[in-house]
Amino acid sequence: MIDTDQDDAGLEALFAGARADPPRASDALLARVEDDARRLQPRGTPAWRGWWRLLGGLPGMGGLVTATCVGFWLGVAPPDGVPDVAGQFMDEAVSVDQTAPDLSAFGWDSEEG
C-alpha cells in the first residue's frame, strides 16, 4: 500500500526547491529576443498607408470609388419611379409618374389586408 501523505510531502519539497531557485534566462538570450522584437516592429510609415491597408488596398479603394460614383449618379439622376431626393433638397419641382410601378416599398404595409 502507498502512503500518499509521504508522497505528497516529498513532492511538495521538490516544488518548494524549484520555487526557491527559479530558472533565469541568460542575458544573451534576452538581448537576442529584444533585437528580434525591435527588428519586427513596423517602421514609421505615413498615416495614409495605414488607411490604405485598412480599406483593402487597391481592390478595396476601387470598389469604394465605384460605389461612391454610382451612389452619386443615382442621387443626382435617379431612374424613373424612384423619388428624386436631390431635386427635393434643391427645391425643384418633383413630378412622379403615377403609371410607373412603385419600387420604393413605401406604403406596402398599408395595402395589405
Image (tube, rainbow, N blue to C red):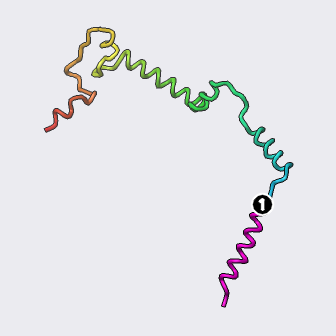
Q: What residue do we see at 51% from left, 23% from top?
A: 65
Task: Using the image, determine if residue 104 lies above or below residue 7.
Answer: above
Q: Is residue 90 left or right of residue 58?
A: left
Residue type, numbered disc 1: Pro
Camera-side residue of 103 and 36: 36
Residue in view at x 79 percent, y 43 percent: 34
Q: Is residue 91 one of those drawn in magenta?
A: no
**Residue 101 quadrant:** top left
* Left or right of 40 in this view: 4: left
Residue 29 horizontal side relative to residue 84, left or right? right
SS majority, magenta = helix
The quarter holding residue 80 reads top left
Q: Is residue 8 magenta?
A: yes
> Which residue in the structure is indicated by mark 1?
22
Q: Position of residue 33 (x, y in %)?
A: 79, 46
| Residue at the image point whose x is 29% and y is 20% from the top | 83
